[in-house]
Amino acid sequence: MIDLFHELEFEPFLISFKLAGLTTLILFIISIPLAWYLSQTNSKMKPFWESLTALPLVLPPSVLGFYILVALSQNSPIGVFFEDVFGVKLVFNFTGLVVASIFYSLPFMVQPLQGGFESINKNMLEASYLAGKSKFETIIKVALPNMKPALMTAIIVTFAHTVGEFGVVLMVGGSIPGETKVASVAIYEMVEIMDYTSAHIYSAIMVVISFLVLLSVYVFNGKQNKKIGV
């Protein structure tokens, strides 16, 4: 068993963590203004934007992956633009995986942040505006520091969800060793060839990672609730 453990390739985990890290960082930057808008607007279009943002939660990964694949292919305007201008193909490579993961993991970042913004005392925000702070300064200096549990939940759950992606990444990135072969795809291939021992080891690692991620979220949020006396 020990010899088998040493023989296993752990590069898929490194690719998974790299993908999750980049996706989480990009989504954090994108989702803050989006979540802020959704939390503050009274527009009649709010339910539409919320539904659109949450769509990856209910769509089968194969459906979402198919449409992302079509949208990023070399025959699409987006694919042609990136290949002509940047010389980058967006399908079956790591760049495409990042783009696909951003769409797939979007609600896992936006919804906790939106909930955090909505939980902030409105008087606190009004006081910030009256003190002459802009919306950007209010978000950075007032809102975000007062919603740490929501921030932690958004970042950690988005990271963990991206690490565990399978359908979308397989559809858009395939299984190219050293580039797009993430841990979930590696497990699938092991099962296909009936290498159940290796699949058990990879799966156990994923279970431990997922549990530790959830544990860290609940422990952190529990400490924060004790601080504010909830």
Image: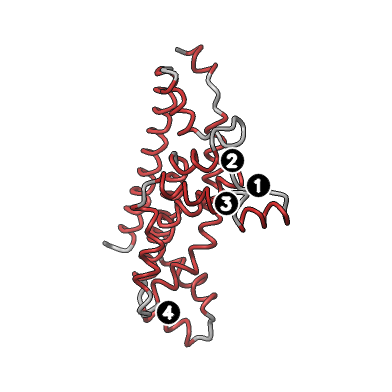
Q: Which one is nearer the viewer's eye here, 163 or 43?
A: 43
User: In the rendered image of this protein, does residue 51 appear above or below residue 123?
Assistant: above
Residue 186: x %, y % from top left: 49, 29
User: Relative to residue 124, is residue 6 drawn left or right?
Assistant: right
Residue 145, compared with residue 96, is above or below; it is: below
| Residue 168 percent across, percent down from the top left | 46, 44
Mark 4 = which residue? 125
Distance of mark 1 from mark 4, alpha carbons?
A: 44 Å
Q: Label 2 belongs to which residue?
A: 92
Q: Amino acid at mark 1?
A: Lys
| Distance between the alpha carbons at the discs numbered 2 and 4 | 45 Å
The one of 167 and 156 positioned closer to us in this rendering: 167
Which of labels 2 and 4 is toward the front?
Answer: 2
Quadrant the N terminus occupies: top left
Location of residue 196 in the rendering, given as x and y in whole percent from the top left corner: 40, 18
Mark 4 or 3: the one toward you: 3
124 sits to left or right of 15: left
Mark closer to the chain start, 1 or 3? 3
Q: Residues within 10 Å of mark 3 (few under 14, many from 20)?
A: many
For disc 1, the marked residue is 89
